[in-house]
Image (cartoon, grey):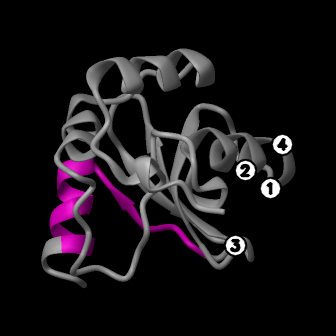
């Protein structure tokens, strides 16, 4: 059962706790995204949540599964899963698209660039 508190905006403490649990430093733009509601309502993606309660969207579960079972390096944080494909984030802020069939090579130099293209412009 889904816990609606998972959809509440995370605090800095919530974010820090997940960073520590995953041993991954989130870029500032991603933290801002999380604290602003992870608003991708105009996009087709459901971003992972920092607060527990919705297992399929919980960032800790998503990342650990991708790292352990899908060959994704733990140097990349999967923050969106879409039908077995992932958007991945580096601690420096670069974003890349990872396809389970290995054919993707899309990258964005920053989280902000990814957000503008994929969520605002929807292209």
Write down the residue under mark 3.
84
Asked whether the residues under the numbered discs 1 and 2 touch, taking CB atoms below 8 Å apart as contact, a structural biologist would say yes
Q: How many marks?
A: 4
Q: Earlier in the sequence, mark 3 or mark 2?
A: 2
- The image shows residue 7 at horizontal and vertical percentages of 38, 53
Q: Which mark is residue 70?
A: 1
Q: Is residue 4 left or right of residue 56?
A: left
Gap between marks 1 and 3 measured at Cα: 9 Å
Q: Earlier in the sequence, mark 1 or mark 3?
A: 1
Q: Give the SS element for disc 2.
A: helix
The part of the chain drawn in magenta is 104-119
Whether residues under marks 4 and 2 lie with C-beta atoms below 8 angstroms apart, the answer is yes
The residue drawn where x is 51% and y is 67% is 105
Relative height, residue 11 to residue 13 (above, below): below
**Disc 3/disc 2 C-alpha distance (Å):** 9 Å
Residue at figure coordinates x 64%, y 71% from the top left = 99
């Amino acid at each position: 059962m889904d816990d609606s508190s998972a959809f509440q905006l995370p605090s800095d403490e919530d974010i820090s706790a997940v960073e520590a649990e995953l041993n991954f430093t989130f870029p500032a733009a991603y933290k801002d995204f999380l604290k602003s509601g992870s608003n991708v309502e105009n996009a087709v993606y459901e971003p992972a949540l920092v607060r527990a309660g919705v297992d399929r969207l919980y960032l800790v579960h998503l990342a650990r599964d991708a790292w352990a079972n899908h060959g994704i390096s733990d140097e990349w944080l999967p923050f969106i899963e879409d039908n077995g494909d992932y958007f991945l984030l580096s601690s420096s802020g670069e974003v890349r698209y990872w396809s389970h069939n290995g054919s993707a090579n899309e990258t964005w130099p920053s989280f902000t660039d990814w957000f503008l293209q994929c969520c605002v412009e929807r292209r």
